[in-house]
Image: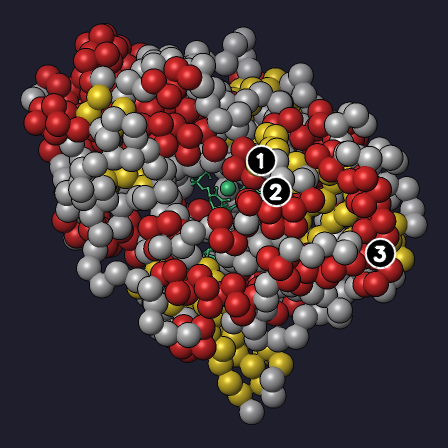
Amino acid sequence: MQDIIKTTCPRDCYDACGIAVVRKDGQIAKILGDPDHAVAQGRLCGKCAIAYNGVWRDVKARLGQPLRRVGTKGEGRFAPIPWDDALAQIATRLQDMIARGDAHKIIHTHYTGTVGLVGGWYPIRFFNRIGATEVDPDTVCNKAGHVALELMFGDSLHAFDPRTVTQSKTLLIWGANPSHAAPHQDRNFVQRAKAAGTKVIVVDPISHGTAKAADIHLKLAPGTDTALAFAILHVLERENLFDRQFIADHVLGAEAIAGSIAEMTPERAAGICGVAAAMIEEAAIAYGAGPSLLWLGQGVQRQRYGGNVFRVLAALVALSGNISKPGAGFLYMNGPGGRGIDMSSVTCPDLASDPPAAISHVDLAATLADANIAKALFNWNNNPAASSPQQRQVRAALTREDLFHVAVDLFHTDTTAYADIVLPAASFLECDDLILSYFDLTMSAQVKAASPIGVALPNSEIFRRLSAVMGLTAPELFESDDDIIAKLLKQTGYAGTFADLAKRGTVTLFSEPRIQFESRRFPTPSGKIELMSDRAVEQGLPAVPQLIFDEPPKAGRIRILSPASMWQMNSSYGNDAMIQKRLGKPSVILHPVDAARIGLAEGDMATLRNETGYLTLAVTISETAQPNVGIVYKGRWPNATLGDANVNVLVPNCKSDIGASTTVHSVEVDILPARGAP
Ligand SMILES: Nc1nc2c(c(=O)[nH]1)N[C@H]1C(S)=C(S)[C@@H](COP(=O)(O)OP(=O)(O)OC[C@H]3O[C@@H](n4cnc5c(=O)[nH]c(N)nc54)[C@H](O)[C@@H]3O)O[C@H]1N2
Ligand SMILES: Nc1nc2c(c(=O)[nH]1)N[C@H]1C(S)=C(S)[C@@H](COP(=O)(O)OP(=O)(O)OC[C@H]3O[C@@H](n4cnc5c(=O)[nH]c(N)nc54)[C@H](O)[C@@H]3O)O[C@H]1N2
Ligand code: SF4
Ligand SMILES: [Mo]
């Protein structure tokens, strides 16, 4: 007998595709895109179509039972143990640390394994209760942007409603690559808007698919965004495209950046950014005339002054008045709050006796290396040995024999190889959850379609059981997934039950398109958009956005960008054989000018080296890059790669100016021809 279960992809992806799980006699036969789903339209992206029908359901690759380490740390030798033993051993070690007053020396990292509201967030209750230290997940991704937008608008999680694009004349995509990171929205949203007459402008150092298809591509030098944005503001002012009334009523401190605007002519910016002045003028006039949408990518803020860049980009929105009206606004992400969901009802911060402590991912290596500040590590939904900066230093710290390490994952990864205990998690196909797209304002059901592999358990159940074994009693630690899901559904105002939602897959919570900040009251202290911010000063930041930008790399160095790969989701799928074939050899994409200067031909091996590490890669030559800029896509599994490292071996512990966030796109290296294979 064949049946079809509708569910939803819970990857950290803009698209949140609807999935049709085809089952034969109750067993999963095939995972397809849901033909009824407005975004997926019957197609998954290539990477998920492969991995969900490959490694994700491969019982040999998946973890099916708890394991304890029998080899040295990093060696990857483990022996199975029953759940009771695994949980008892963990409980004993943690209880001992807690009794000694070292609870805050229990460090936990988590992030994008699943973005399900339960699977992604419920375990935080446990860590709040015991007083552990969280490695702030956003600091390895998008924290600088969040903090900057929060300072200026009072909220970074209320974005434009993509449906308003029908009223937009221009769509400006700044430092995002939808052709990789949001492949369905690239087709459905960007290309459809363009076909309907909306002018699409992309600002990006590389010629990715979305940039190539755009009306205008401003291919700026990385790190020069501030100069370009101030030049756009210069043109807007000159062309009388500032919204003077909106500024007078709703913007604080516009006059304080007047000097920078006057100074940065398009001609001057052209010299800094490497973009023709005429193109800057054309883009500025299109954006300023509006109504315009601005899609703020996460790539653009992953640089040394990424927070400041976001503050200047927010000034584009504020001074042109491209907000609070149909067809206008900006998108970083649409958070749960806009759909009525209170995430603290999932994470329960009040369970902590002291405010939960947090550190930056950028400090992970140093933290784990220090026995005085890290006694235990839990990693769940996260593969820091592949994803975090200072890869070599992180992995060296993970060899500490006295660091008690528990890993919760679907697979043996580069990180689990160091763990004392490995716990097998159930995948999204094996438990219910709620998924919220962060691009649009829908809500979707993740629906159990199969039993977990072996004795694997959902993240939430693992932490319920551990709480019980540790003798913890707070009722919040034992709330069932069904109850949490029902509570969250009620918060959204959705009239049905989870079973109703499961039948439909995805629902839109608002029948009419929402206008971003329609009330024109911004949740800042002044109620206005704060270009001038006292709160910034309190955080030790300049009061207003600054005209600062990066110089080109020194003396022949190359700036390496490591954005989203088409074939992986962060490091996920790096262990799928078919995906590995699609990925081909680990490579660096160089511009022909640089390849010629260094003396490299297509397919040659080259070593990238800087103060943090080195990596040998095959050379691909393409004008997708630009002179002085190379591309190494993120996410390879070090242990599946000759040389046992990925691009994060080159990423230093350098923090962004705002939010102590990662700076993966500010990395500079020397490149030398290498002999032979890596
Ligand atoms: N150089 C460079 N590095 C980067 C970036 C970059 O642009 N350049 N991007 C950064 C960004 S944006 C991010 S968000 C981070 C992401 O980094 P991570 O959060 O480490 O993301 P993944 O590498 O996909 O690892 C997620 C892990 O969760 C596991 N998993 C999947 N489902 C489940 C589940 O249900 N339960 C449990 N317990 N585990 C599960 C997967 O098998 C995988 O091992 O990487 C960052 N690293
Ligand atoms: N296929 C796939 N999809 C993904 C992911 C994945 O790994 N693979 N990861 C998911 C996650 S966790 C996230 S956070 C998102 C990230 O998705 P995006 O927001 O698109 O972020 P990135 O891929 O890091 O980078 C986007 C663009 O920023 C550009 N960029 C780099 N430096 C600069 C600069 O100085 N200025 C400007 N203007 N642009 C710059 C890069 O060239 C790149 O094209 O994607 C999600 N979707
Ligand atoms: S990763 Fe994104 S594009 Fe791929 S199936 Fe999942 S939601 Fe869709
Ligand atoms: Mo991310």
- Mark 1 near mark 2, Cβ–Cβ under 8 Å? yes
Q: CA gap, disc 1 to disc 3? A: 27 Å
Q: Are marks 2 and 3 in contact (CB under 8 Å)?
A: no
Q: Which residue is mark 1?
A: 355
Residue 596 visible from this viewpoint: no
In the image, what residue occupies the spot 35% across and 27% down?
Answer: 151
| Residue 131 visible here | yes
Question: In the visual, does 135 lie left or right of 487?
Answer: right
Q: Amino acid at mark 2?
A: Ala
Name the disc covering residue 88, or none: 3
Q: Which mark is residue 352?
A: 2
User: Which three-letter amino acid code belongs to the residue tagged 3?
Assistant: Ala
- The quarter of the picture where residue 103 lies is top right
614 w.r.t. 72: above or below? above
Is 582 left, or right, of 264 in this rendering? right
Question: At label 1, which amino acid type do we have?
Answer: Pro
Residue 169: where, in percent of width, then height? 14, 42
